[in-house]
């Protein structure tokens, strides 16, 4: 089977609780990712929408929150329209480091996308890079 896992790590000069809130709170998620239909809650579905979709009619990505261990770990299922029904898994791990927080993201289950080819895999890789840069920027502008 082809390896198809994306792993990203960033280090943020912010307390672990602040980083956790940026991952899970409705009013924060849209600052770096896409606007959310609510705070993330274990065992509950979630949906993210385009910035211009004020009425939240067209989901961009969605899934179910599978596990929450505040402020250390968050796991959810994840899909987008382009995945044609394939559901993957995103895990966030937060660790306190000197003066800040290390945030690690692991996106698994992408081998199921083999029929759509390298393009979607590469697009997800680039998308996570863009979103994690925006995540980090939320803390550098508030310091």
Image (cartoon, helix red, strand yellow):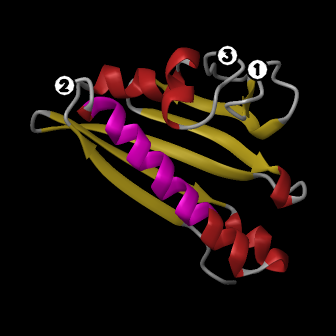
Mark 1 or mark 2, which is nearer to you?
1
Q: Compute the Cα span from label 1 to label 2.
A: 29 Å
**Mark 1: secondary structure:** loop
> Is 5 left, or right, of 18 in this rendering?
right
Q: Nearer the viewer, mark 1 or mark 3?
A: 1
Left or right, 139 with respect to 88, comes to: left
- State which region is magenta: 124-139
In this view, 110 is above or below 10: below
Q: Nearer the viewer, residue 12 or 110?
A: 12
The residue to which callout 3 is attached is: 38
C-alpha span from label 3 to label 2: 26 Å
Name the one closer to the observer, 103 or 33.
33
Residue at the image position 81 percent from the left and 23 percent from the top: 56
Q: Residues within 10 Å of mark 3 (few under 14, many from 20)?
A: some
Which residue matches tag 1?
54
- 120 w.r.t. 69: above or below: below
Q: Position of residue 68 (x, y in %)?
A: 54, 27
* Quadrant hosting residue 39: top right
Question: Which of the labelled discs sits on residue 143, or is there none?
Answer: 2
Q: Residue at x 65, y 50 (%)?
A: 89
- Residue 57 position, x and y percent, is 88, 27
């Amino acid at each position: 089977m082809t390896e198809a896992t994306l792993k990203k790590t960033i280090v943020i000069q912010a307390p672990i609780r602040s980083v956790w809130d940026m991952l899970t709170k409705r009013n924060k998620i849209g600052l770096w990712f896409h606007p959310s239909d609510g705070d993330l809650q274990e065992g509950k579905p979630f949906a993210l929408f385009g910035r211009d979709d004020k009425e939240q009619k067209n989901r961009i990505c969605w899934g179910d929150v599978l596990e929450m261990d505040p402020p250390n770990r968050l796991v959810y299922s994840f899909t987008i329209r382009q995945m044609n029904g394939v559901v993957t898994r995103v895990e966030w791990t937060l660790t306190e480091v000197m003066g800040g927080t290390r945030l690690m993201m692991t996106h698994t289950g992408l081998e199921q996308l083999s029929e759509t080819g390298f393009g979607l895999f590469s697009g997800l890789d680039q998308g996570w890079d863009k979103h994690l840069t925006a995540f980090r920027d939320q803390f550098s502008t508030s310091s």
